[in-house]
Amino acid sequence: MQNNVLILDFGSQYTQLIARRVRELNIYCEIHPYNNIPEDLKQFKAVILSGSPFSVRAEDAPHPDLSEIKGKLPLLAVCYGAQYLAHFNGGNVAPSNIREYGRANLSYIKENETFFENIESGSQVWMSHSDTIKELPSGAVRLASTADVENASYRIDGESTYAIQFHPEVYHTTDGRQLLENFLVKIAGVAQTWTPDNFVDMTVADLKKKVGDGKVVLGLSGGVDSTVAAVLLNKAIGDNLYCIFVNNGLLRKNEFDNVLKQYEGMGLNVKGVDASARFLDALKDVEDPELKRKAIGRVFIEVFDDEAHLLEDVEWLGQGTIYPDVIESISVKGPSATIKSHHNVGGLPDFMKLKVVEPLNMLFKDEVRRVGASMGIDPELLGRHPFPGPGLAIRILGDITEEKVRILQEVDHIFIEGLKSWDLYDKVWQAGAMLLPVNSVGVMGDERTYEKCVALRAVESTDGMTADWVHLPYNFLQKISNDIINKVKGVNRVVYDISSKPPATIEWE
């Protein structure tokens, strides 16, 4: 690909957002740590420097060698990047008198500048820095200011080097997309060729070359990522793809049978394996959420390995890994602090001896859905809410029993079907129910009850990194609560979770 954009990550919380915004312009980009710049820069037509939690004035500040980039490739420096170019090129960066964080408006824009084409004075931008550029670097021309930030943007004369002290990638910068388009398309001349159809054609060709006549085994979950990965592999190698869908006994009500039927209609070579008893036995008396995950992961590998051994000459393991997982593993800071183990298997034990193929490992979640749509996958399947790999095991707080699973499956079914019938399902990113490890007093038919409490959770998000609780209608919640208490034996109380992520997580365990 000759239309790549390189994003150098200095550790900003917004780096993934930059990549997402670039991809939305149908331009392919890759994120690399600032301290691991690709040797072959010929594949890139432009470079973007991200923000950073560091100060350029600190001794331990990121300090890469940009001699092969600055002045040789179109360069856009964002926030820390802008301060970095100023600090090390004759400018002056100093602590700001006031912390420049949040919304601001451009009060001055230099006329007849392609970089600010179709952007007017007064446009809202998002600031997030405690340092500010007091003096521009050598050869710089001021392009924009706000009321508090004189040097909000500049360019270097004689170069295609541009810098901004605000973040064009965040939603609050209203013309951020236009600014990125001006730089990448009009200044850098990057072609907008990154489309779902092109991705499918390119990936299928690559898979044919990589896998050849080899056989691939892939674990399906019923979710978007594994399904799209399976369809791509099926396009490339056909019947040499063997899909296994394992029922761990912790799926939603009727999900095992329903998903298998969906897959049959897609022409995939799928085998369903009901290992419910094996998983529930491994979870007996286990209460710690991390131990639950490990037990489920271990049994899944055992079941999957048993099934893979029934196939002859399988060389490859297919996985639905997506780009955020890849970015996390190569980030500037390394993998972030472990909040919980990854829902997926993670690593393979040595005894499996399979090479890994990951056709989606350069896509964000929304891109996976668009690729799936371009291949004609059922919109209902593509629109499915994310569901954790350990399933209901991490939505049942405390130990797992068959009866608890039954209760939560019924509660979850009423909640999810209710969202669908009220036309709310597609307005929610993820929803589910939690079975709490407490009993509460209730009254049913003039009799005292002492039964379970369940919590309903519905969030809106784009990628699960952050999430807000959804303001579901009160009359909907009232109806669902009544249905659950009246129809699910063992539950007498329903609560609604109104915490956001952060500080809470989406799942309770």
Image (spheres, rainbow, N blue to C red):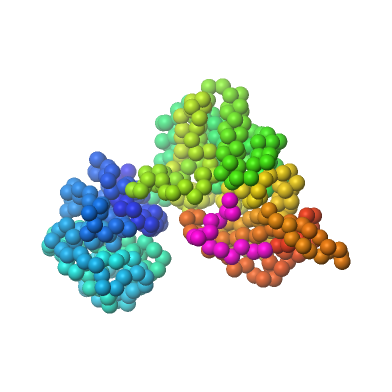
Whether residue 182 is visible, yes or no, is: no
**Is 505 part of what is drawn in magenta?**
yes
Q: Is residue 237 magenta?
A: no
Count of labels in the image: 0
Please state the extent of the stretch shown in magenta in the rendering: 495-509
Q: Quadrant of the N terminus?
A: top left
Q: Residue at x 52, y 47 (%)?
A: 340
Q: Is residue 273 above or below residue 496?
A: above
Give the x, y percent position of residue 42. Answer: 24, 43
State left or right for residue 212 relative to residue 259: left
Q: Nearer the viewer, residue 137 or 312?
A: 137
Q: Nearer the viewer, residue 380 or 201?
A: 380
**Residue at position x 74%, y 60% in the image:** 440
Instruction: Determine the image quadrant of residue 436.
Output: bottom right
Image x and y of residue 149, in percent: 26, 72
- The secondary structure that dominates the magenta segment is loop
- Image check: 373 left or right of 105? right
